[in-house]
Image (spheres, grey):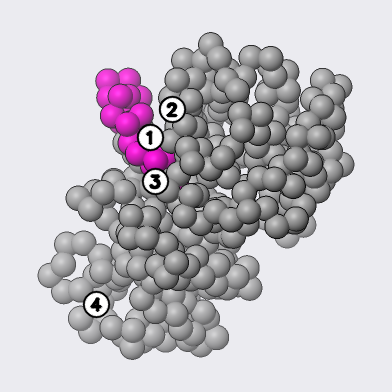
Amino acid sequence: MMEEIEKIILADPGTFFPRREAPRRLGTLLVKGSLGANAGRVTFLVFRDEETAPSLAVKIARAPAGESLLAAEASGLRFLAEKLSAGVNSAAPKLLHEGNCLGAAFIAEEAVGGIPLGAEMAQCLFSREKKASALLLEASSWLGRLARESGRPADGEKKAVPAAEKFRTRYPLSAGAARFLDGLKADLECLDRECRRVFVHGDFSPMNIYFGEGGLRVIDWAESFHGGMPLHDLFFLLTCSVAGAGPAEEEGTRRLDNFSSLFLREGARSELARAALKRVSNGLDLREGMLRPLLALFLMERANLEYDVLERQGQSGYMLPLRPFGENANWSDGSLLRCGLYGRLFERIAANSDRLIF
């Protein structure tokens, strides 16, 4: 099959970037469009004759950034398959092939079926919210197993303190947020010295988590890495899970308010957040005093990443440079701009530090 995949790429190397809508047949294979073209890579699904579900997901690099992402995904999938138990690695797609065609790196992996957790949440906002919460907790339990099996003692690498220093130089913090960050200094140093490091998915969003006949599956490991802080993936999942389904102009405010509903004691979803935290942190030897600095560190790391992305987009002319913390928090064409989201969330927890669930 891999030879046929290479023929598909050779036949028309520009076919799959940008998006291709119409199916294309080559030999016994049928290629149905692409799933997107993010960060210099494109993914398309391959079907065998008579199959109703795809056999493969093939990802092709179209830029140097795409090559590094494919390398990270392949490395992450190999690590899961070779080093971790079946109870953990069965959730990840199997890596089937790594190749290069016309100078373009590509990987082929098992195509994952099922329904994304994000779709379940969209359907369950009201009448079936209990089901969505149960699925989120199931994903949290799997995260806990991943963290426990991949965990290793702190190795002296400083991650928390440098991230905080970078965040402080980039974002114009309010006086209250600056005081809150000052108060975290000793805790962040403690994280660098004592906190176990784990393997991190890096993009553990509801749209990368699937549920089907085979149970939970997790796709898109291109941002995975070793040596991350525990709870990073959980905090990302929770932050993404509370996005409202309202008009774009309201989305930024909804995310802030929904975040509060999870992490403030009186929040409507605070019990769900507590239950998810318990499932992930159980067995990781995390003292309760570590949870607050871990949340703050997660927000600062994501804010720094947002800043890098925004800066690159501005420099490339992809979009006009916008200041993080600027008033316009959404794309002018109606799609959400996450400019400054995590910096704003940091301000939110700083202003409510005496009301957090931990």
Residues tagged 4 and 2 counted as in contact (Cβ below 8 A): no
Distance in Å between CA atoms under marks 2 and 3: 13 Å
Q: Which mark is residue 275?
A: 2
Q: Secondary structure at mark 1?
A: helix
Q: Residue 273's spot in the image, x, y percent?
A: 48, 27
- How crowded pointer 2 is (Cα within 10 Å; few <14, some 14-19, many 20+) is rated as few
Distance in Å between CA atoms under marks 1 and 2: 7 Å
Q: Is residue 153 above or below residue 276?
A: below
Residue at which label 3 appears = 142
Instruction: Give the mark toward the camera: 3 or 4.
Output: 3
Question: Tag 3 or tag 2, which sits nearer the N-term?
Answer: 3
Distance in Å between CA atoms under marks 3 and 4: 34 Å
Q: Residue at x 71, y 42 (%)?
A: 191
Distance in Å between CA atoms under marks 3 and 1: 9 Å
Residue 257 inside the magenta-drawn segment: no
Residues tagged 3 and 1 counted as in contact (Cβ below 8 A): no
Q: Residue 92's spot in the image, x, y percent?
A: 37, 59
What's the residue type where badge 3 is placed? Answer: Trp
Residue at which label 1 appears = 137
Q: Is residue 144 left or right of residue 85?
A: right
Whether residue 271 can be seen here: yes
- How crowded pointer 3 is (Cα within 10 Å; few <14, some 14-19, many 20+) is rated as some
What's the residue type where badge 1 is placed? Answer: Leu
Comparing 333 with 61, the one in front is 61
Comparing 343 with 22, the one in front is 343
Distance in Å between CA atoms under marks 4 and 2: 45 Å
Q: Residue at x 51, y 56 (%)?
A: 150
Q: Is residue 275 left or right of residue 337?
A: left
Q: Residue 195's spot in the image, x, y percent?
A: 66, 45
